[in-house]
């Protein structure tokens, strides 16, 4: 969307008893943010000034920030729609998901010594190829963008391994196979909220919908991860990252008590070509989003650079 589309002039409230000044033309805001390359810090400050600016940011600016910082990802999530394209949970939630690592806390299936606070990430990379590794075989037609895990050293907590915190977002979650599967299994919503939009969440571990390929993609081991999906399609989770020096043949360790989908019988190449055309090309949209084939956990994705460093 360019600066001339869907921009509404706002007028000063004369005689209406309103003390807050209006914005003469939203095009001015658009041009200002374009000139500063959609700085995240400035947009957060502007949206907290008053309710009018907050409403403009919610309706227009957060969506433009997402489109500027992650154009390919946003184009896929919206099906290429421009203008007023809607997305589950709203664009402020998507913007937060792009730039904010939500931290971690103890859950039913994942134990921590203490809560890990969230923080703004300086750089994140989201990949549709990685997302396919988090979908059980029956849900492989869904589109899920996943971040690489944000690594946190937990040595002082008595843990040898680092903690990985990851996040993602579904395209059109309301009509996805994953949602249909959760509802079909009558999985109950957890007594916790999504850190990005505040909606209720399902535990994919409790639902037994965690494929083994998720642990391989994260660089973890089976049974040492947990992730949740909210009713708006935002995913967040945690895992223990295996040390790089550890022996990879110990991959069969199920020490965390995590249950996996009983129908999941994947081999090592399943999360690369099972639903594709054999060339590594994604079968859902036909976009060229290849995973690495050297056994690493990296994949081609879209790198998103934030306006904050790792801590504030």
Image (cartoon, grey):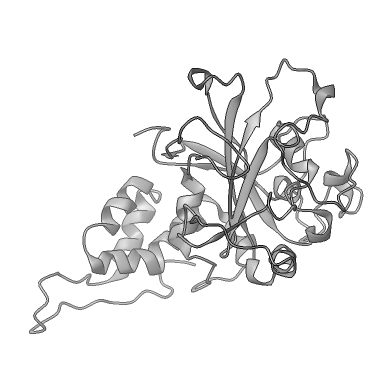
Foreground: 76 or 158?
158
Query: What residue occupies the far bottom of the structure in this picture?
Result: 15
Residue 45, image x, y percentages: 27, 51
Q: Determine whether, in the image, residue 248 is placed left or right of residue 10.
A: right
Residue 241, image x, y percentages: 65, 28
Q: Tell me if residue 180 comes above or below residue 139 in the rendering.
A: below
Q: Tell me, yes or no, if residue 172 can be seen here.
A: no
Q: Determine whether, in the image, residue 50 is placed left or right of residue 6.
A: left
Q: Determine whether, in the image, residue 50 is placed left or right of residue 100.
A: left
Q: Tell me if residue 26 comes above or below residue 267 in the rendering.
A: below
Residue displayed at 63% across by 30% down: 240
| Total marks in image | 0
Query: What residue occupies the far top of the structure in this picture?
Result: 245
Q: Quadrant of the C terminus?
A: top left
Q: Quadrant of residue 220?
A: top right
Q: Quadrant of residue 293?
A: top right
Q: Tell me, yes or no, if residue 65 can be seen here.
A: yes
Residue 59, image x, y percentages: 39, 69
Q: Tell me if residue 54 comes above or below residue 119 in the rendering.
A: below
Residue 258, image x, y percentages: 72, 42
Q: Tell me if residue 122 comes above or below residue 47 in the rendering.
A: above
Foreground: 218 or 110?
110
């Amino acid at each position: 969307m360019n600066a001339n589309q869907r921009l509404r002039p706002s007028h000063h409230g004369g005689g209406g008893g309103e003390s807050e000044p209006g914005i003469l033309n939203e095009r001015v805001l658009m041009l200002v943010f374009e000139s500063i390359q959609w700085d995240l810090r400035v947009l957060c400050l502007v949206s907290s000034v008053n309710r009018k600016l907050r409403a403009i940011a919610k309706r227009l600016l957060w969506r433009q920030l997402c489109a500027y910082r992650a154009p390919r990802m946003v184009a896929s999530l919206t099906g290429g729609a421009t203008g007023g394209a809607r997305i589950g949970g709203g664009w402020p939630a998507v913007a937060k998901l792009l730039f904010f690592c939500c931290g971690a806390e103890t859950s039913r299936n994942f134990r921590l010594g203490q809560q890990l606070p969230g923080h703004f990430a300086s750089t994140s990379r989201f990949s549709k190829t990685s997302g396919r590794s988090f979908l059980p075989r029956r849900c492989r037609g869904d589109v899920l963008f996943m971040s690489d895990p944000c690594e946190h050293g937990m040595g002082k907590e008595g843990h040898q391994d680092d903690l990985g915190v990851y996040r993602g977002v579904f395209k059109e979650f309301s009509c996805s196979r994953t949602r249909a599967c959760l509802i079909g299994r009558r999985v109950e919503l957890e007594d916790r909220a999504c850190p990005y939009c505040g909606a209720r969440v399902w535990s994919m571990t409790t639902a037994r919908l965690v494929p083994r390929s998720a642990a391989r993609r994260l660089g973890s081991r089976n049974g040492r991860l947990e992730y949740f999906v909210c009713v708006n399609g935002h995913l967040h989770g945690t895992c223990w990252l295996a040390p790089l020096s550890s022996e990879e043949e110990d991959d069969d360790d199920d020490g965390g008590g995590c249950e996996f989908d009983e129908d999941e019988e994947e081999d090592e190449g399943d999360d690369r070509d099972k639903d594709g055309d054999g060339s590594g090309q994604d079968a859902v949209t036909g976009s060229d989003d290849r995973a690495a084939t050297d056994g690493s956990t990296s994949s081609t994705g879209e790198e998103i650079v934030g306006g904050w460093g790792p801590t504030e």
